[in-house]
Every structure is written in C-alpha cells, then in structure tokens.
Image (cartoon, rainbow, N blue to C red):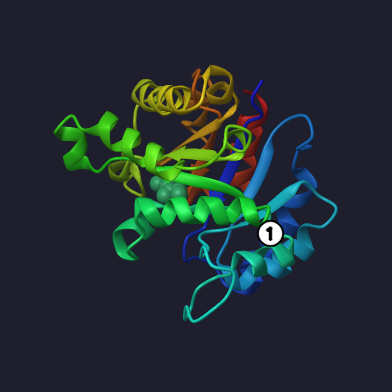
Amino acid sequence: MRKPIIAGNWKMNKTHGEAVSFIDEIKGNIPSSEEEVETVVCAPALFLKEMKDKAAGSDVKIGAQTMHFEESGAFTGEISPAALKDLGITHSIIGHSERREMFNETDESVNQKLHAAFQYGITPIMCCGESLEQRENNQTEQIVRDQVEKGFAGISAEKAPDVVVAYEPIWAIGTGKSSTAEDANETCGTVRKVLAELYDENTAEAVRIQYGGSVKPENIDGYMEKEHIDGALVGGASLKPDAFLQLVEAGRNE
Ligand code: 13P
C-alpha cells in the first residue's frame, strides 16, 4: 500500500513572514504522516530554516525546490544538498520543468541530483512531463519514458522506491487546463511500466507517483481515485492555507 503524498511547490512566491505564518496556520491540522498521508511544503530556500523550526512537533515536512549535486564549491547562487541535510530538510523537487526550461536542467543533471539526494538522505521528488507540442505529436510516452530511464540511471532497486515521481504535463502547469484524470493516470501508468522494466514489478509498485498541473481542491479527488496516482504536486493552490489543507485532506481520504 503506497502512502499518498501531497506536496506544495510555492515556486518564487511569499515573503519570509508569509511563509512562517502559513506553517503556523496549517500545522495544527495536518494528519499523522505515520499512517495517513505525507505532507510536504517545498518553499524558497531563504525560508526553509524558519519554516522547519515552525513546523517542529507537527507532521509537516519542509522541502526545497531544487538543489545542486555537489556538496560545496564554486557554484554561485546554488543550494548545497549537505546544507539542506544540515537544516533537517527532508525533500527536494528535482528537475521541475521550469528548471529544465529556464535553468538548463537536463536529464543528466537530474540523475546526478538523484544520486546526491540519496547521499544526503533527502527524498527526491523527480519531475517529468511533456510539452503541448510533444503531446500533440503523440510523443508523451516516449518523452516520459526517456526522462524516467535517464533520471533513474544507476539508482539501485533498493533505493528506487524512495524516489517520488511527479508527472507534470507542462501544458497543464499554471494554466488552469488540468489533464483529465484518465490521461494523467495513463501516463503515470507509463511511468510505472518503465520502472517495472528497469527494476521489477514489486519495485515499480512501491514507487509513489504524483500528478501535478492545475490541481486544486475541486479536482483533486478525481486524480486520487486513480490506480497509478498516489498524490499531487501543487503550485498555485498550495499557496493558501485553507486550500492546501483541503488538498491534504483529499490525500488522506484516498
Ligand atoms: P500549478 O498547480 O500552479 O499548475 O503548478 C504545478 C506545478 O508546477 C507544481 O510543481
């Protein structure tokens, strides 16, 4: 049985004060991650420490939105996985399409970051997904297959179940045009099929796969009901405490 995982991706939103008061508002209402649903807020790096401190004693986990694969060095502006670990940061999004498109993230760097995440005990939320053009050219399966194969290269069968995969079709991100639950489930099923080919059925069955792209309280149930969808990675709707709590509640009721 896969435990659902609901993660907010705040992107470049909120100030420090807003970030900390968000955690204050939600933390009393987060279900136990031991049995029910895992709750993660992936915030700008600037706020992680204080959010983590504020979340103490609750089951809200705090994640980064990206990280570098090297421990330290001349990488101006980058975020060290060792520094994240030191702060008690448990998750990091890796290979979000915005980072692939705007910040030269490649399948190779995604793979290096997956390895680094394991080295530093950080759970990677590895994003994949096709553009509108690729979808219209019927390339969705091939694109996602390629991203998963390259992203997981060299990751052992023991570690693979600890990767969270987020399938986020690029045309659905921030557009209000969410994928149908059927289409999202089909592509999440493709991710699982590729993992079964790379590893084995049991390993593939253990990996949690999120859908992301215009998920909101009004449409999350449709996704959560589906066989291959184990949670959501949510941008815009994760910014408001009430909406975020509703999303977590929907994950819990899966
Ligand atoms: P929206 O939920 O705003 O579409 O963003 C999705 C996303 O990119 C999450 O990583």
Q: Residue at x 31, y 47 (%)?
A: 175
Task: Name the side, left or right, on which 76 lies relative to 24.
Answer: left
Q: Residue at x 36, y 27 (%)?
A: 187
Query: Label 1 is placed on what type of residue?
Result: Ile
Residue drawn at point x = 32 percent, y = 38 percent: 146
Q: Quadrant of residue 116?
A: bottom right
Residue 244, visible in the rendered structure: yes
Image-quadrant location for residue 73: bottom right
Report the residue marked by disc 1.
89
Residue 204: x and y in percent read 53, 24
Of the 4 image quadrants, the one containing the N terminus is top right
Q: Position of residue 157 (x, y in %)?
A: 58, 32
Residue drawn where x is 77% and y is 63% of the image:
54
Q: Depth check: give the residue in front, 180 or 79.
A: 79
Taking 116 as reference, is 208 above or below it?
above
* Location of residue 252 in the rendering, given as x and y in whole percent from the top left corner: 67, 29
Q: Secondary structure at mark 1?
A: loop
Identify the image quadrant of the C terminus.
top right
